[in-house]
Amino acid sequence: MIIDELLQPIVDALATTELGAPKTQAVIDRHIEALEAMLALGLTYKQIAAGLNDRGARGRTGAEFTEQSLYNLISRARGRKDRPPVAATRRPSVRPADFGRPSPPSGAQNSPISPELDRFRQRIDQARTHAAMDDFLFRRGKSR
């Protein structure tokens, strides 16, 4: 039966190994096409969950699949399928050569420091000022 052919790879992927149980969401992410094919054939989430449970498939914690848990897993997998890979969305991590040097006055022009770095340094200075003020106001008479 076609349902068995679609379910068996999922059941095999969910099997516990000597390394432990696989992450359920990762397995569903890898097999989303098979699950969507079953839904397209007219199967319900409840029927698919029952099929997985009948074949001995369990989630990472050992719990049986329910209609709701399978719906949640598939919904998350569908959302991940439409997103670009994480590496494609990350900006390269580049540390400026002048990291750690005092920032120039805010009115300086032709500054090699990016505006983002300048704002970051201003926030750090504000945090230090607030911490010093807190220490002065609230711990003034107490010994450490």
Image (tube, helix red, strand yellow):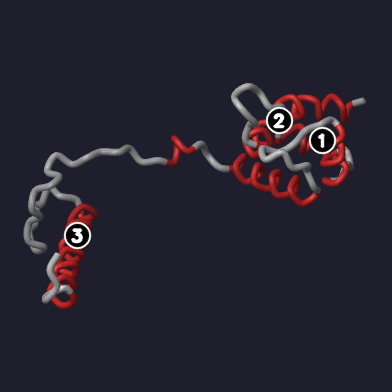
- From the image, state whether disc 2 or disc 3 is nearer to you: 2
- The residue identified by callout 3 is 124
Amino acid type, residue under disc 2 in the picture: Leu
Question: Which is nearer the N-term, disc 3 or disc 1?
Answer: 1
Q: Position of residue 118 (x, y in %)?
A: 18, 56
Q: Position of residue 140 (x, y in %)?
A: 12, 75
- The residue identified by callout 1 is 52
Q: Nearer the viewer, residue 117 or 57?
A: 57
Amino acid type, residue under disc 1 in the picture: Leu
- The residue identified by callout 2 is 14
Q: Residue at the location (16% across, 70% down)?
A: 135
Amino acid type, residue under disc 3 in the picture: Ile
Q: Residue at the location (79% across, 47% down)?
A: 66
Going by the picture, which residue comes out furthest to the front? 143
Instruction: Name which quarter of the figure residue 131 lies in.
Output: bottom left
Q: Are marks 2 and 1 in contact (CB under 8 Å)?
A: yes
